[in-house]
Amino acid sequence: MHRRDKHTDKRADRGPMAADQPLGAADSDDAYARGATAETGDPAMSDPGAPHGAAVGGVTPPVSSELVEQREKYLRLAAEYDNYRKRTARERQEAGARGQADMVKQLIDPLDDLSRFAHLDAATVDAATVVQGAELVERKMLKALTAAGLQVIDPVDQAFDPALHEAVATEPALSPEDDHVVARVYQPGYIFAGQLLRPARVVVKQWNG
């Protein structure tokens, strides 16, 4: 009377398995999830060791606004410096041209005087007049050049200075005190704006004992 139906027992044994997920389904879902994550190319999941902001999979991260601002600032500064350099070079050139023009302007009057004396009739003008005219031109030219910064080196009776003088000859000195003293000047020297243009060519006294 209490014999169990074999078919009923089998269905009862299979009942709980049918209600639950089939064996191996959970593992299949996990594997699918892992595969989907790998296919999406998420840097945080695919390469945990990659540095933050680095290009992954050939994709370059966007440039930050701060970097763009710094680059624009650098370009502006470079352009401003280039304009400043060009402006200062142009101003120096213009200042030099103005200085030369001022010097030439001061030489115009002596040039006019020289031109008048150069075209005098030698048959009607005596030598004294020509000499006086030449002296006048010399004084005017020296005045103009001195105002522009020219210094004349005329070291008669001064100690010989090899930095400013060039000895072209010597003559005996009458006393030891006159040794290496300039006796005569063949050609005066000139200094302009602190630069030696030409040394004075002189005769130097030499004491021979």
Image (cartoon, grey):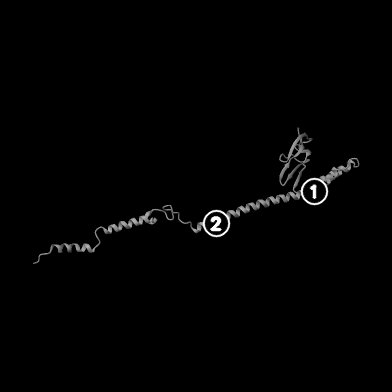
What is the three-letter code of the residue carrying label 1?
A: Ile
Near mark 1 (Cα within 10 A), the count class, few <14, some 14-19 or many ≥20, is: some
Q: How far apart are marks 2 and 1 (CA)?
A: 54 Å
Q: Quick one: 144 or 17, which is closer to the camera?
A: 17
Please give the label number shown on residue 108: 1
Q: What element carries label 1?
A: helix
Please identify, in this view, whether the residue under mark 2 or under mark 1 is nearer the observer. 2
Can you say whether 173 is above or below 106 in the image?
above
Q: How far across and down, in percent of the image, does residue 101 sit? A: 75, 50
Q: Are marks 2 and 1 in contact (CB under 8 Å)?
A: no
What is the three-letter code of the residue carrying label 2?
A: Glu
Q: Quick one: 160 or 137, which is closer to the camera?
A: 137
Left or right placement of residue 109 versus residue 59 in this view: right
Q: Is mark 2 on a helix, strand or loop?
A: helix
Tell me the quarter of the picture where residue 199 sits: top right
Q: In the displayed orientation, state which residue is furthest to the left.
A: 1
Q: Quick one: 53 or 17, which is closer to the camera?
A: 17
Left or right placement of residue 76 versus residue 171 in this view: left
Q: Which of marks 2 and 1 is nearer the N terminus?
A: 2
Q: How far across and down, in percent of the image, does residue 68 sit? A: 51, 57
Tell me the quarter of the picture where residue 28 sits: bottom left
Left or right placement of residue 89 versus residue 113 in this view: left
* Residue sitting at x 21%, y 63%: 16
* Residue sitting at x 19%, y 62%: 14
Q: How far across and down, in percent of the image, does residue 94 sit? A: 70, 51
Q: In the displayed orientation, state which residue is furthest to the front.
A: 7
Q: Name the residue under label 2.
A: 72
- Is residue 206 visible in this depiction of the protein? no
Quadrant placement of the C terminus:
top right
Left or right placement of residue 12 versus residue 38 in this view: left
Q: In the displayed orientation, state which residue is furthest to the bottom.
A: 1
